[in-house]
Image: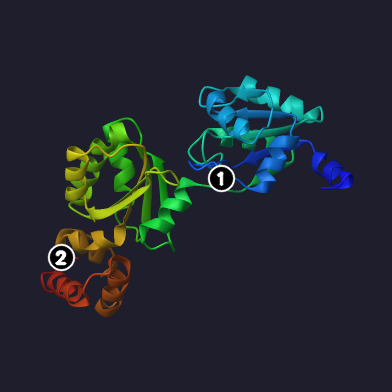
């Protein structure tokens, strides 16, 4: 590496740099990320102990400051002031891409409102890694992240996706896994589900099975580590009962021909057309619309 190239490496504009870091395997970091971490004036992270291990591995010596769930507006104002004074600042999460299930979005929103330069340094993400390993459809994704703490809010969140044909992605820790699986089963039944854990690490594992089987595996041999739960909602269509379909038909039957109604509901729920059409006839014959 010649001296001129080294000087180019040392040049970095003032602004915020969102740097993705490994989710497990320390080799999963880009050359660009290492350059930025070497060059920035300040690094903020969720847990200085975690980030220190990464920087030490790559022989990067930087003073670390915390920015996490407990950071407030005053902390964000300090970062803004530093950047306005010409400093370059990097934000890191403990693992993966910043702002994915962490509080960095508040900082980004405030800096954008102040016309501050913000640069994403892309890299690892448990979200994308788990999806591509799952074998589930990837054309539509619904990312829940971590479920809320209260049962009522968790139920609301899980109910939202019932009528969507999408792959659902949920982050969970091992202590709450059994509870989360039980709640998913209560709402959706014994569906096919995928568990991805310890991604990119030595004990990486992806399990796909009926939810009852995964609950059994979890109870017999505790599933440890950082966990991602995935399932596709298209398999839920068969459990929609006739009352639910009739409610949909009633909304349309005064305005549309039965054949068109049948096609609409078939497309939405992927149900047999004969079943839908028979219900349309039933409602029409019994004057229930």
**Image coordinates for residue 44, horizontal then vertical, percent:** 63, 28
Disc 1 or disc 2, which is closer to the eye?
A: 1
Counting from the top left corner in percent of width and height, residue 162 is at 29, 54
**Count of numbered circles on the image:** 2
In the image: residue 250, left or right of residue 71: left
On screen, residue 285 versus residue 160, left or right, reads left
Q: Earlier in the sequence, mark 1 or mark 2?
A: 1
Q: Residue furthest top?
A: 74
SS for dot 2: loop
Q: Nearer the viewer, residue 279 or 90?
A: 90
Colour basis: rainbow
Q: How crowded is mark 1: few (under 14 residues within 10 Å), some or many (20 or more)?
A: few
Question: What residue is pinned by disc 1?
Answer: 27
Query: Which of the pair 211/33 is nearer the observer?
Result: 33
Question: What numbered label is drawn on residue 61?
Answer: none
Residue at x 21%, y 50% (from the top left corner): 211
237 and 181: which is toward the camera: 181
The residue under the point 17% across, 39% down is 220
Q: Residues within 10 Å of mark 2 (few under 14, many from 20)?
A: few
Q: In which quarter of the image is residue 235?
A: bottom left
- In the rendered view, does 216 fall on the left or right side of 134? left
- Which residue is labeled 2 in the image? 288
Circle 1: element type: loop
Who's the residue at 56% across and 39% down the image? 98
Q: Residue furthest front?
A: 1
Query: Residue 28: x percent and y percent?
Result: 55, 46
């Amino acid at each position: 590496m010649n001296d001129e190239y080294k000087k180019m490496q040392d040049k970095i504009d003032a602004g915020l740099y969102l740097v993705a870091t490994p989710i497990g395997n320390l080799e999963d970091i880009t050359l660009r990320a290492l350059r930025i971490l070497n060059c920035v004036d300040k690094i903020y992270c969720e847990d200085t102990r975690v980030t220190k291990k990464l920087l030490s591995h790559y022989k990067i010596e930087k003073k670390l400051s915390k920015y996490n769930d407990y950071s407030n507006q005053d902390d964000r104002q300090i970062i803004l002031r530093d950047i306005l004074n010409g400093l370059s600042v990097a934000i890191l999460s403990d693992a993966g891409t910043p702002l994915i299930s962490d509080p960095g979005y508040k900082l980004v929103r405030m800096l954008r409102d102040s016309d501050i330069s913000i640069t994403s340094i892309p890299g690892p993400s448990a979200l994308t890694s788990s999806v591509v390993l799952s074998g589930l459809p990837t054309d539509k994704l619904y990312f829940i992240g971590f479920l809320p703490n209260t049962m009522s809010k968790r139920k609301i969140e899980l109910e939202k996706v019932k009528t969507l044909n999408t792959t659902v992605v949920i982050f969970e820790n091992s202590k709450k896994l059994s509870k989360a699986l039980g709640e998913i089963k209560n709402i959706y039944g014994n569906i096919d589900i995928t568990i991805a854990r310890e991604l990119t690490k030595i004990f990486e594992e992806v399990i796909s099975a009926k939810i009852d089987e995964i609950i059994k595996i979890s109870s017999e041999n505790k599933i440890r580590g950082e966990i991602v739960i995935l399932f596709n909602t298209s398999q839920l269509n068969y459990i929609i009962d006739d009352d639910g379909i009739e409610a949909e038909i009633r909304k349309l039957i005064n305005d549309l021909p039965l054949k068109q109604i049948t096609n609409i509901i078939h497309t939405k729920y992927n149900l047999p057309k004969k079943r839908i059409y028979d219900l349309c006839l039933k409602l029409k014959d019994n004057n229930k619309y």
